[in-house]
Image (spheres, rainbow, N blue to C red):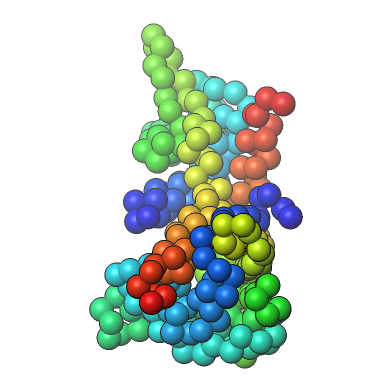
Amino acid sequence: MNPDLDLVLQRVIRAPRTAVWNAWTDPSRFAKWWIPAPMTCRVDRFEVRPGGPLVTRMSEDGTTFVPHLDAAFLVVDDLERIVFTNAIDSEWRPTNPAPVAMTAEITLGDHPDGTDYRVVVRHGDPAARARHEELGFLEGWGTVTGQLAALTESQVPR
Amino acid sequence: MAQYSAELDGVFTALADPTRRGVIRRLGRSPTSVGDLAREFPMTLPSFMKHVRTLEATGLIRTVKLGRVRTCVLNHDRLALVDGWLAEQRQIWEDRTDRLERLVTDPEEHP
């Protein structure tokens, strides 16, 4: 874990593991929660197996859909764990996704009240991505954030 | 979120200039008067003041006038905005988990 790049989320969901698993693995159920209303989600490709595609599109008006996520499942352990990444797309081509590349690991466990639900999202370095883009200045975001980090750290009393 | 993006744009635009980054770096060491700052940068005072005003407008720095001396101070909270992307991703996942939770605990979904 890198606290500057990764996030961890843990919840107890008051529903059986099978219900949570189904919400993650049945595309019609997945589409119901993946994207916030009023936007609608369309699941284009969804094969919950290692290497399988996870492609979603979203729409504001229910008619015109724009790309949302083009990712691939990495690990699928039945009723226990799902790992996917957008660092490669659904065709396994390396990508440079916006706003930042990530690998998400979702773990389901038993809990007396339902399901112990954990998410770990490991992000790439957003500065690394910015270096590949025209951000309107030559030195790049990476240099700037590096400088900012250096100067703010030097200011924080330890 | 739109307002957050606009603020972020402002901060990055302000930081897109080497003089302004130099000012930020200098103020990271200590608050400094406009006059002392200006002497460290090879340009006219009016040109330099434009940069100071740009930084001030984005909230990256504050200026305080004491008598005849105007002093620039770095605003660390504002700089922290550029670290905001992780907080934003966390919020997305928290909201997503809220929706998942609502779906799987909704009795109408499990008749």
* Residue A68, quarter of picture: bottom left
**Residue A101, located in which quarter of the rendered image?**
bottom right
Foreground residue among B50 and A109: A109
Q: Give whichever of A94, A146 is nearer the camera.
A: A94
Q: Identify the image quadrant of the C terminus of chain A.
A: top right
> Residue A94: image x %, image y %?
66, 81
Taking the view exactly as shown, the residue that stands out farthest to the top is B67
Q: Is residue B6 above or below residue A109?
A: above
Where is B48 relative to A74, above or below? above
- The x, y position of residue B23, in whole percent, is 54, 35
Residue at 38% x, 69% y: name it. Answer: B107
Whether residue B35 is visible here, answered yes or no, is no
Residue B48 falls left or right of residue A62: right
Q: Tell me how many marks there are.
A: 0
Q: Quadrant of residue B58?
A: top left
Left or right, residue A100 beside residue B64 = right
Left or right: residue B40 compared with residue A136: right
Residue situated in front as seen by the camera: A141 or B48: A141
Quadrant of the frame with the N terminus of chain A = bottom right
Asked whether residue A11 is in view, the answer is yes
Residue at the image position 65 percent from the left and 42 percent from the top:
A149
Residue at x 36%, y 38% (from the top left corner): B57
Residue B103, percent from left and from top: 42, 69
* Residue beneath the point at 57% across and 57% down: A113
* Closer to the camera in the image, B82 or B16: B82
- In the image, residue B106 sits, relative to residue A57, either above or below, namely above
